[in-house]
Image (cartoon, grey):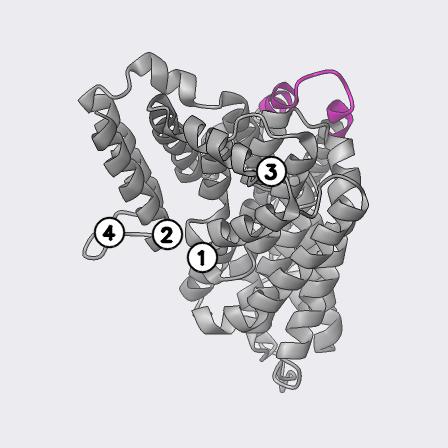
Amino acid sequence: MTLLILVLFAVTYLGMALGRFPGLSIDRTGIALVAAILLLAAGALDTGQVVEAVDFPTIFILLGLMILSAQYAGSGFYDWCALRVARAARSPARLLAVIVAVAGGLSAVLANDVVVFAMTPMLCVGLTARRLDARPYLIALAGAANAGSAATVIGNPQNILIGQVGHLDFWRFLGVCGVPALAALVIVYATVWLVWRGRFGLPDGEGTVAETKLDRWQLGKAVAATVALLALFASPMPQEHAVLLVAGVMMISRRLASRDMLGMVDWHLLVLFAALFAINHALGLTGIPGALVRDLETAGWLPDRLAVMAPLALAGSNGIGNVPAVILLLAAWPSPPEGALYGLALLTTLAGNFLLPGSLANIIVAERAAASGVHLSFAEHARCGIPMALLSMAVAGLWLWGGGWMRLL
């Protein structure tokens, strides 16, 4: 049985790295789900163990944030915001700054994957209408969404999981991670500007694009819900309860059908999380991860220091993706110190900017842009992504070391 678990585990994470298997249309979620089903069918896991493996608080927080984001989407806010951003500034430098600020700010509160999914198509429309090359702005959108999401414990899926494992306080997390996340936003802006300088293009005539309708009442409800959620995070209520409570209130509406709101939930991401939890739990039952952690601890190579954590985060995030990398590491290392959790959140998130497959947000931007007629290549992203990731990780590492949260060696 151990051999079967190891084979399915290896095949799953190979699929995470490749994105899909040649000749098949199965994607990362499908690969993980099929592997979990095979483990269940073979008896390597029973139903109770599958339920035990899934970190439901993490799933609940993700679900609740997606429903809250659906309230913003239903009000027309994302479309309105993307078009206003595209039209706001006449100069490319100012426009780039606005995109970085908006994407980073929204991602800190509403989860980066949701923000880029909603904003990318309309941003492409607005930029194309202005006769601007959308590619550098899309790179900035993805980079800023990743950087901004590093600031909070609800900014992205891996941070949500890390926060649940370590029972991290929302406001303390912001105090530790907010400064390097802000510095990373500046790095994203400066990198894209320098790499693409002189090639942004200037509008040579205004195109026309359909106006978007903003439902101010629904937007007001979304903003009020967000403020209430942040207030609840300062209360003793568990974070998953607070998020679900706010999401439940949002679903009580006369204008937005609950079916439509649930239709905006990224169920594929939730299924991916659940399947990976099950697969990693099966591996844990073999005893191999525990033995490996003990050997690493004896050798002094646990990732509780920056010299180990930084290269591990860079390799893992860009090898199998930062979400699977964090799930895998926490399954093998169940009780990391608080400082290491801050480092894991910051470094895996910022490392996601290194290459296009490094984060789900990057992939979403590229795929949504392609559907809108804008092709963003691997090499074009890498020219900006590599320096922005390395510089922001260096700043984050210095901050963590200087603040005493992590050792260097």
User: x, y (%) of residue 28?
Assistant: 34, 45
Badge 3 amino acid = Asn
Badge 4 amino acid = Ser
- Residue at (58% x, 63% y) in the render: 123
- Residue at (71% x, 64% y) in the render: 187
Nearer the observer, 338 or 125: 338
Residue 25 has which mark? 4
Q: Quadrant of residue 208?
A: bottom right
- Residue at (57% x, 28% y) in the render: 61
Local packing at callout 4 (Cα closer than 10 Å; few below 14, some 14-19, many 20+) is: few
Q: Do the CB atoms of the residues marked 2 and 1 lie less than 8 Å apart?
A: yes
- Vertical arrangement, residue 260 with respect to residue 197, above or below: above
Verify whether residue 193 appears in magenta: no
Dot 2 or dot 3, earlier in sequence: 2
**Residues rendered magenta in the picture:** 230-250
Name the main secondary structure of what is drawn in magenta.
Answer: helix
Dot 2 or dot 1, earlier in sequence: 2
**Dot 2 corresponds to which residue?**
17
